[in-house]
Image (tube, helix red, strand yellow):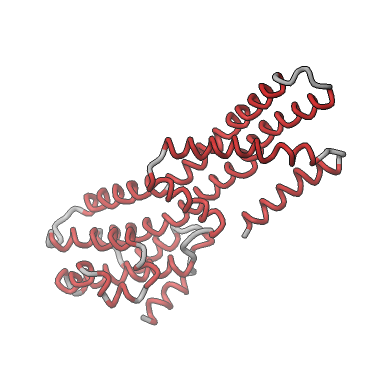
Amino acid sequence: MFAAIGIVVLLVMVFGVFMLSGGDMGVVLHALPIEMGIIGGSAVGALIIGNSGAQLKALLGGFGKVFKGPTYVKQDFLDCILLTSKLTKILKSEGPVALEPHIEDPQSSPIFSEYPKLLKDQTLVHLIADSLRLVVVSSGTLDPYAVEDVMDQSIKTHHHEAIGPADNLQNLADALPALGIVAAVLGVVKTMGAIDQPPAILGGMIGSALVGTFLGVLLAYGFVGPMALRARSVIESDGTIYQVAKQIIIASLHGHPQPLIIEAARTSLQHANQPSFADVFDAIRAR
C-alpha cells in the first residue's frame, strides 16, 4: 500500500513540478517508448545473463514483497513461540518417545496443525523438526552449542537464498544509470547522423537523447533502489521467526525455566511484532 502511494507521489512531484515550471511533456513522452525500450530491454537481458530461472522467479517474488509487505505479523510470532515451546515442553516432561511422532510427520501432528500458517513454511517446519530430531536420535546427549551451530548454519543458508531478490534489485538499481547513458549515447549518435537538420529539429533530438539519462537515474534512485531496500527489510523481518524458534529450542536444551525462555524470545522481537507479556502467557494458559 505505502509502496503504491510512494510511486504516485514520486511521479506527481517529478513530472508535475516539471510541467509547472514550463517543461514540455511532449518531448519526454515522444522519447519515452524508445528510451524505455532500450533501458528496460537491456536491464532484462542483463538479469537473464546473470541469473538462473529460479533466481528470476524469486526476483519476481521480491517485487511482490515490496507491495505485500511481511508475511508474518504479531500473531504469527506469538504462534511460533507457542508451537516451539509446546514441543520443547513435551521433550522435557514426557521424553523423546512422546515427541517423536510430531517431528517425524509434522503434517499429521496435532500440535503443528494448530498453526496452519506456520505449517506452510517448510523452512520453519524443517528447522524445528530437524533440530529436535537431532536431540531425539542422540538420546539427549548432544551439546546444546553443537545444536545451535547446526541451526545457525541452516538459518544462514536460508537467509542467503531469501535475500537474493533484494540483492538482485540493488544490482539492477546500480546498473540503471549506466544503461540510461547507453540509451542517451545512442540518441546522440542518431542526432549526429542528422547534423544537417535545422536547430529546432536537432534540439528535439538532443532532448530525446537526454531523456535516456534522466530515465536511468529516475528508475535507479526513485524506483528500483527503494524497492530493493523495502524487499530487504521485509525479508529480514520475516526471517526473525527462525531466530525465535532457535532461541527457544537452544535455551530449552540449556535447561532454562520455560517462563525465562519465552520472555527472552518475546523481547528479542521488534516492537511492531512483539506480543505483550500478558498475550503470551494468557495464550499458554488457554492452551
Find residue 177 and report its image quarter: top right
Please indicate whether residue 227 sits to the left or right of residue 235 in the image. right
Please indicate whether residue 16 sits to the left or right of residue 211 in the image. right
Q: Residue at x 22, y 50 (%)?
A: 146
- Pick the front one: 258 or 21: 21
Q: Is residue 226 above or below residue 263?
A: above
Q: Residue at x 16, y 55 (%)?
A: 142
Number of numbered callouts drawn = 0
State which quarter of the image contains the N terminus. Answer: bottom right
Q: Residue at x 87, y 39 (%)?
A: 22
Q: Is residue 75 above or below residue 143?
A: below
Please indicate whether residue 19 sits to the left or right of residue 99 in the image. right
Give x and y (percent) for residue 100.
Answer: 18, 69
Give x and y (percent) for residue 159.
Answer: 38, 48
Give x and y (percent) for residue 61.
Answer: 47, 53
Q: Is residue 260 above or below residue 52?
A: below
Q: Residue furthest bottom?
A: 286
- Pick the front one: 179 or 21: 179
Find residue 174 and report its image quarter: top right
Give x and y (percent) for residue 213.
Answer: 67, 31
